[in-house]
Image: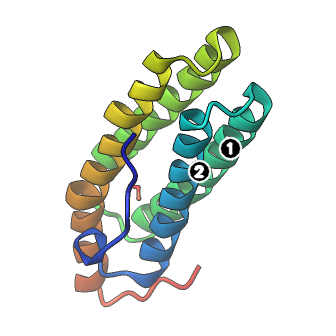
Amino acid sequence: MLKIKWDDSLSVGVNLIDDQHKMLITRLNDMSNAVEMHQGLEKIMKTLDFLIKYTDFHFGTEEKHMTKFCYPGMDYHKKQHEKFKSTLNNLVEDFKEEGATEVLANSIDTFLINWLINHIKIIDIEFGKFLNEKGFECTE
Ligand code: FEO
């Protein structure tokens, strides 16, 4: 299965957001490992739960700053976050019903990991540029 390694190409130029992305990547890799190693459903659900909670926290941070600075791309960006959250929730339901099947393992690779990389490299980087143009230093 794919693993993401954070490097400078994923930097959005805002330390707070970069640090949260690093944590998100760690949690996504943890879940991928749990599935790959055929760990029990309970363990997989736990990593999935961590991932969902951290995703909510991270998207909330970005959206808070979008609102604060009237970011013009906010609606589109928020819709992408909602789509990701919805897919994660569907994965939880699938895991509950089917366990860690190969199909589900592949959906982590093909959807979650690729989605996150593309989202950071295109949509988040654009938002990071906007924040930097505003001369804003995110600290919370
Ligand atoms: Fe870093 Fe828009 O999620």
Number of numbered labels in the structure image:
2
| Residue type at numbered disc 1 | Thr
Does residue 8 appear to the left or right of 137 in the view shown?
Answer: left
Can you tell which quarter of the image residue 136 is in? Answer: bottom left
Assess whether mark 2 and mark 1 are in contact (beta carbons under 8 angstroms). Answer: yes
Does residue 95 appear to the left or right of 76 in the view shown?
Answer: right
Name the disc covering residue 131, or none: none
Can you tell which quarter of the image residue 89 is in? Answer: top right
Per the image, the residue denoted by label 1 is: 47
The structure residue drawn at horizontal position 21% and vertical position 65%, both measured from the top left corner, is 126
Q: Is 7 rendered above or below residue 37?
A: below
The crowding category of the residue bearing disc 2, from other C-alpha atoms within 10 Å (few below 14, some 14 to 19, many at least 20), is: some
Residue 107 position in % (x across, y down): 40, 26
Per the image, the residue denoted by label 2 is: 30
Q: Quadrant of the N terminus?
A: top left
Q: Is 106 rendered above or below residue 96?
A: below
| Residue type at numbered disc 2 | Asp
Label 1 CB-ligand 1 distance < 8 A: no
The structure residue drawn at horizontal position 43% and vertical position 36%, both measured from the top left corner, is 84
Residue 78 position in % (x across, y down): 39, 45
The structure residue drawn at horizontal position 74% and vertical position 29%, both measured from the top left corner, is 40
Residue 87 position in % (x across, y down): 47, 27
Q: Is 92 rendered above or below residue 24?
A: above
Q: Quadrant of the C terminus?
A: bottom right
